[in-house]
């Protein structure tokens, strides 16, 4: 994508903010992540208008599972150190969609943006970061999405597209698994209902 396409598509203000997030990735905090989520939700509406993102139908719970399956089936997990030769790089949803690749936070942010695009309230969806126990017994920093279904209001369910993908209906699964998701650094939503 050329600079003129980037300026024409998103404007100078968006580009400067995007560059700032990329330079300041070393100290992620809820405030910066919240602003990044808001911009990616706005970008989702733009991408939908240009036929790059799908809309889903049904109840909110059905839509959330359809969104999860779509991300899981269309985005390939690839760590930043392999792809970009850096420890951490948070992509915009446009980059994730364009390259069909990303790591844990790229998929979680895409899940969040698609949920908001499909009229799922920010009171029901949040991006979480913390420590997860891997299948080999070690632990790692991780980012995932949590969703509060209408059917089980008050309970949060993990939607982890890359480490522990589970696309069962909410009535057929347990809520957040504290044996896998060990600690929480922070959780963020865009606070737009």
Image (cartoon, grey):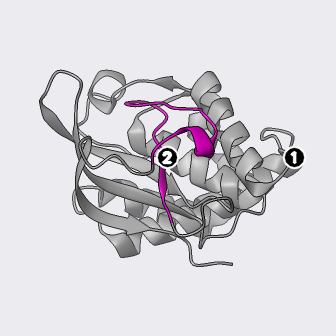
Query: Residue 158, image x and y in percent?
Result: 46, 48
Q: Nearer the viewer, residue 166 or 71?
A: 166
On the image, numbered disc 1 is attached to which residue? 57
User: Which residue does the image show at 30% across and 56% down from the upper left?
Assistant: 25
Residue 170, compared with residue 161, is above or below; it is: below
Query: Residue 62, image x and y in percent?
Result: 75, 45
Residue 164, compared with residue 125, is above or below; it is: above
Can residue 163 be found in the magenta stretch?
Answer: yes
Count neighbours of disc 2 (C-alpha within 10 A) and say few if under 14, some if 14 to 19, many if 20 or more.
many
Query: Residue 154, image x and y in percent?
Result: 53, 70
Horizontal side of 4 relative to 143 (left or right) equals right
User: Which residue does the image show at 15% across and 37% down from the upper left?
Assistant: 139
Pick the quarter of the image with the C terminus: bottom right
Residue 69, compared with residue 55, is above or below; it is: above
Can residue 110 be found in the magenta stretch?
Answer: no
On the image, numbered disc 2 is attached to which residue? 108
Q: Nearer the viewer, mark 1 or mark 2?
A: 1
Task: Give the SS element for disc 1.
Answer: loop
User: Which residue does the image show at 77% across and 63% down from the upper left?
Assistant: 119
The span shown in magenta is 155-174
Pick the quarter of the image with the N terminus: top right
């Amino acid at each position: 994508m050329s600079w003129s396409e980037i300026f024409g598509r998103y404007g100078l203000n968006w580009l400067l903010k995007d560059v700032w997030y990329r330079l300041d990735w070393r100290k992620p905090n809820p405030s910066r992540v919240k602003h990044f989520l808001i911009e990616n939700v706005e970008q989702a509406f733009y991408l939908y208008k240009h036929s790059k993102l799908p809309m889903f139908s049904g109840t909110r719970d059905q839509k959330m599972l359809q969104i999860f399956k779509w991300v899981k089936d269309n985005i390939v997990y690839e760590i930043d150190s392999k792809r970009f030769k850096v420890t951490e790089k948070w992509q915009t949803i446009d980059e994730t969609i364009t390259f069909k690749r990303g790591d844990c936070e790229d998929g979680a942010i895409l899940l969040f943006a698609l949920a908001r695009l499909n009229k799922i309230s920010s009171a029901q969806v949040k991006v979480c970061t913390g420590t997860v126990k891997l299948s080999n017994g070690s632990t790692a920093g991780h980012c995932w999405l949590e969703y509060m279904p209408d059917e089980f209001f008050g309970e949060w369910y993990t939607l982890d597209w890359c480490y522990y993908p589970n696309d069962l209906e909410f009535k057929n699964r347990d809520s957040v698994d504290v044996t896998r998701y060990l600690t929480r650094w922070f959780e963020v939503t865009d606070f737009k209902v």
